[in-house]
Every structure is written in C-alpha cells, then in structure tokens.
Amino acid sequence: MLFAFWLGFGYRAVLVSLVVYGFLPVLKNTMTGLRAVDPRLVEAARGMGMSALSVLVRVELPLAVPVVLAGVRTALVLLVGTATLATFVDGGGLGLLITTGVNLNLERVLVFGSLLVAVLALAVDWAARVVEYLARPRGL
C-alpha cells in the first residue's frame, strides 16, 4: 500500500498495489512451467522447421498451461486476503467490517467479516480451479 503516497489514497492506489502484488506468483509459475517443458520436445519442434515464436506458442505454452494457471489461482487467493488491507488507504472492501469490529470491540462483526473473507477466498479458489480444469489442453 506504499503506492497510496504516490498515487493518492483510494481505489486507484489499491488497484495498482494489488496488480503489482499479484504479478510475482504468476510470473514465477510461468517461468517454472516453461522451464519444465521437455527440451527434447522443443528440439523436435525446431527440427520440424518451426520458428522460435511458433515453438513457444504451439509447444511450450500449451504444455506450461497447468503450472501457469496454478500461479494465477494462487495469486487470486492471495489477493482476496490482501484486499482486506485496502480499508487502511480508503479503498473500502471487506476489511472495513474487520476494522470496525476491532475498533468498536464488536466480536460478531469481526468474526462475520473474517468469515466473509475466508468464504470469498474459498469461492475464488474453487472458481479458478474450474477455469484451470476447463483451460487445460486435452491429453495433459
């Protein structure tokens, strides 16, 4: 949330911060997925006369899709939990319930807000898992 000092408080700072925060897991899993592709498959594709771009698009990326989508799913779940901190830079969100519960010593509001965040994280994980299953190339 350091972007709040640079971009000003509010929605825009929260959005930029969450995009930057979610970028690393996706990038790391993309690199890991591309490294995990069997070099013999890449060599065979190059031997068939495919260009480097064609090998990337037609061989390497389809084989790396499961690992890349696992990184996207991880980033989404992390962002749901981190988005609760948006309340501290005037970004709203479910963190408002949690901080209200803490500040006013209302345990029910605190627990309810925390449970909502947990249920939302589980729902996002489930939805991302379904998308991951549907986007996986056939035969993998």
Image (tube, grey):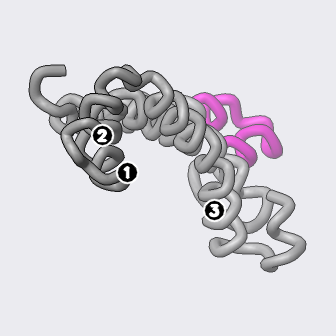
Q: Quadrant of the C terminus?
A: top left
Amino acid type indicated by mark 3: Gly
> Which mark is in front, 3 or 2?
2
Q: Which residue is mark 3?
A: 92
Identify whether 26 is placed above or below 4.
above
What number is the disc on residue 28? Answer: none
Q: Quadrant of residue 48?
A: top left
Amino acid type indicated by mark 1: Ala
Instruction: Find out whether the residues at labels 1 and 2 contact each other: C-beta distance under 8 Å.
Output: yes
Q: Which residue is mark 1?
A: 52
Mark 1 → mark 3, Cα distance in angstroms: 46 Å
- Foreground residue among 3 and 97: 3
Residue 132 location, x and y as percent? Answer: 27, 33
What number is the disc on residue 46? Answer: 2
Q: Quadrant of residue 114?
A: top right
Residue 57 location, x and y as percent? Answer: 29, 49
Report if residue 88 is visible in the image. yes
Mark 3 → mark 2, Cα distance in angstroms: 51 Å
Query: Which residue shows up at 49% across the image and 38% down it?
Result: 30
Question: How many C-alpha atoms fall within 10 Å of the one at disc 1: few (<14), some, or many (≥20)?
Answer: few
Range of residues picked out in magenta = 97-112
Q: Is residue 99 magenta?
A: yes
Q: Secondary structure at mark 3?
A: loop
Amino acid type indicated by mark 2: Arg
> Which mark is in front, 1 or 3?
1
